[in-house]
Amino acid sequence: MLKYVAKFIGSILVLALSSNFIAAEPLTAEPDKLLPARLGNFKRVSQIRPPQALFKEGLLNQKIVKTGEFGQDWVGGEVLYLGASGRLLVELVQFRSDTAAYSLLTIIARAMGESGNGLALGSRFGTASATSQDRVLFFKGTVFVRISAQSPVDSNELDEFAKLFEQTLSEGEGEIPVLVKHLPEWEKAQTHALYLSRFSSLRPIVPEQTVLAVLDTVTDSQAVVADYGSSRLLIIEFNTPQLAADIDRQVNAKIQELKSQSQPTPTSYRRVGNYSVFVFNAPSDQAANELIDQIKYEQVVQWLGENPYWLKEAERRYTETTLGVLIAVIKASGLTLITCFGLGFLIGGAVYARRRARQATTEAFSDAGGMLRLNLDEITPQPNPARLLTGRN
């Protein structure tokens, strides 16, 4: 069971999740609310116990949990459910934030894959999920869930149970972290990206790159790792521009030091806003810089009190609204004009065609070469109907 974990997790998972997660939401007080006794045709057949498998795999820090009690930063447990075709082991962890639950999902999905890329994430269950032949793992809101078949189980039954279970969980924010969305081609990259909501060290990601030791003292930061061919992209987000600037100076100094000692260095490094962006093992400097060029830092400013620039904000909104109305009027007028011309052309053409058809089937006698002649000058004599010959036998 631990074989797939050893391939990638090693020390990085212990380092990634050993620190406490940021407190944001209250935790559920009782495990029965997270692990109900019945779900459809499935019945809970064991007592709720601490998630021992996650402890053994190094995915959770057992030091902050006592047997039968909840930790300070997460609650969780594992339990068996019995279905029609076999037993299912459910491992559940509730954190204080959605990002922590998503982080655990990416770590385990990355570790479970037989190849270096791990299992691909999708949205089949919960906010994001990954599936294999006998397992389903997903996160929804602040909760991470892993469902494992303990014996051969019908795949439809496994999917049915996962669907029932996710419906008992709160939606939460319903989004993956924004940092992941700032990856180049993020919709494709996020299927195999590794996201760390907090970390104590990033050196296991690229062990030969000692420049990452500069980040060992960083706290309350998040990181995302994604592979683009042979290139490995690492983005670290810092909470303040001051911290980002300090780390940037330290990283640049460390890179110069390593170059002078002929030690391995990143293919490219750059600070982008509050991000520190590293590219390792890229085929060329140009390829590395092209990756970094696609990363945009979007700054959000929120005033704790009254916005001192409310007048400028009002002017900006008024201008945007006025322009929007003007553009809408122009579009509506143009559409109306085109419609009127189109209808006029269709109706006029139909009337013209109908009259030409009627004229073609009507016999006319004229001394004007087939054209009608109007006796406007009263010169043409009018025939006397009484003298006209009629047909007789």
Image: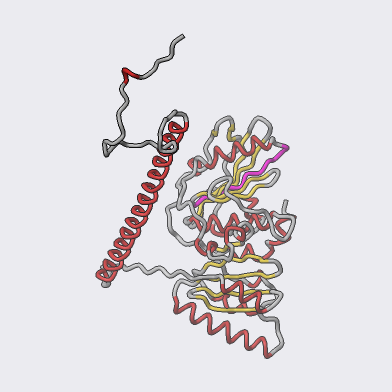
- Which quadrant would residue 386 be assigned to in this image? top left
User: Furthest residue to the bottom?
Assistant: 260
Q: Is residue 321 left or right of residue 350?
A: left
- Residue at x-position 59% and y-position 37%: 161
Is residue 148 magenta-colored? yes
Magenta extent: 142-152
For residue 292, above or below residue 358: below
Q: Where in the figure is residue 221, as x and y percent of width and height?
A: 51, 69
- Residue at x-position 70% and y-position 62%: 8
- Residue at x-position 52% and y-position 80%: 247
**Magenta-drawn stretch, dominant element (helix, strand or loop):** strand
- Residue at x-position 44% and y-position 74%: 240
- The answer to which of 31 and 323 lies nearer the viewer is 323
For residue 71, above or below residue 353: below
For residue 23, above or below residue 356: below
- The answer to which of 295 and 167 lies nearer the viewer is 295
- Which quadrant would residue 367 be assigned to in this image? top left
- The answer to which of 157 and 391 lies nearer the viewer is 391
Q: Where in the figure is residue 27, as x and y percent of width and height?
A: 45, 51
- The answer to which of 77 and 83 lies nearer the viewer is 83
For residue 217, above or below residue 134: below
- Which quadrant would residue 211 be assigned to in this image? bottom right
- Please name the colour scheme applied to the rendered image: secondary structure
Q: Is residue 365 left or right of residue 317?
A: right
Q: Where in the figure is residue 353, as x and y percent of width and height?
A: 45, 37
Q: How many marks?
A: 0
Is residue 272 magenta-colored? no
